[in-house]
Image (cartoon, rainbow, N blue to C red):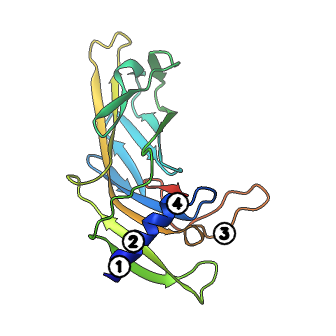
């Protein structure tokens, strides 16, 4: 009962505070058909290697594509999409339809779409809590609440669907469909999330940073 009261009060604070970032939600992702190595998600076959970087506020679909072959590799941006909870968003926009990746080289792409549109609020009762010393004041304890998800009940899943060919006319095209879902969400005080407060224009650091995960600032 005490835990339920705590999380209810926490959600009330998150929804009522409008002027200052008070909490951070950390989102951990799980790959479906790519591998995780050194806290990064990577898809690789005999032809290409795709490396992902999601770490950003609300997450961002960023990836690089490396052509492993000795032949030119083409990508059709019109037939490629970012897909979030089954809703497809095109990559084409102002880009040329056909992209070109020379042999033994890579290109990088930053999509403008966030991985999630807002913070998570449907906590219910099936969450866990742990207490640890505060980063800014070890003599004071703080609580981190976490909730786990499966692929079936995750609030967010997203895919990167890309179409390639070794011919510019795409007579022998093939597609790569990398899929991910949010497997855990944790909420904590903003001071617990950041290891240091940014100063003199420097970026803050955090022990939670992993290229496969991302976070959401909550007012």
Residue 155 x, y percent position in the rendering: 30, 51
- Which residue, given by chain and number where applicable, does mark 4 sit on? 16
Sequence-first tag of 1 and 4: 1
Q: Is residue 45 visible?
A: no
Residue 56 x, y percent position in the rendering: 53, 50
- Which residue, given by chain and number where applicable, does mark 2 sit on? 7
The alpha-carbon separation of the residues under discs 1 and 2 comes to 6 Å
- Which residue, given by chain and number where applicable, does mark 1 sit on? 3
Verify CB contact (< 8 Å) between mark 1 and mark 2: yes
Image quadrant where residue 124 sits: bottom left
- In this view, the mark in front (3 or 1): 1
Verify CB contact (< 8 Å) between mark 4 and mark 3: no
Sequence-first tag of 4 and 2: 2
Sequence-first tag of 3 and 1: 1
Q: Residue at x 52, y 60 (%)?
A: 16
- In this view, the mark in front (3 or 2): 2
Nearer to me, 200 or 162: 200
What is the number of the mark on residue 196? 3
Seen as rendered, the residue at the extreme left is: 152
Q: Residue at x 59, y 56 (%)?
A: 18
Say which element carries label 1: helix
Q: Residue at x 46, y 27 (%)?
A: 103
């Amino acid at each position: 009962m005490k835990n339920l009261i705590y999380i209810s009060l926490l959600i009330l604070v998150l929804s009522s505070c409008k002027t200052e970032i008070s909490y951070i939600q950390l989102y951990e992702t799980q790959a479906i058909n790519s591998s995780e190595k050194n806290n990064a998600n990577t898809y690789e076959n005999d032809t290409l290697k795709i490396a992902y970087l999601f770490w950003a506020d609300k997450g961002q679909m960023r990836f690089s594509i490396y052509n492993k072959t000795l032949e030119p590799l083409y990508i059709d941006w019109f037939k490629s999409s970012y897909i979030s909870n089954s809703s497809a968003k095109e990559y084409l926009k102002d880009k040329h339809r056909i992209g070109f990746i020379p042999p033994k080289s890579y290109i990088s792409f930053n999509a403008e779409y966030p991985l999630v549109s807002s913070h998570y609020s449907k906590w219910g009762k099936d969450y866990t809590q742990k207490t640890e010393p505060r980063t800014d004041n070890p003599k004071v304890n703080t609580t981190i609440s976490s909730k786990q998800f499966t692929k079936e009940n995750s609030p967010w899943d997203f895919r990167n669907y890309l179409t390639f060919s070794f011919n510019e006319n795409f007579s022998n095209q093939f597609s790569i469909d990398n899929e991910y879902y949010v497997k855990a969400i944790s909420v904590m005080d903003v001071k617990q999330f950041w290891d240091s407060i940014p100063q003199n224009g420097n970026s803050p650091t955090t022990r939670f940073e992993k290229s496969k995960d991302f976070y959401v600032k909550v007012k």
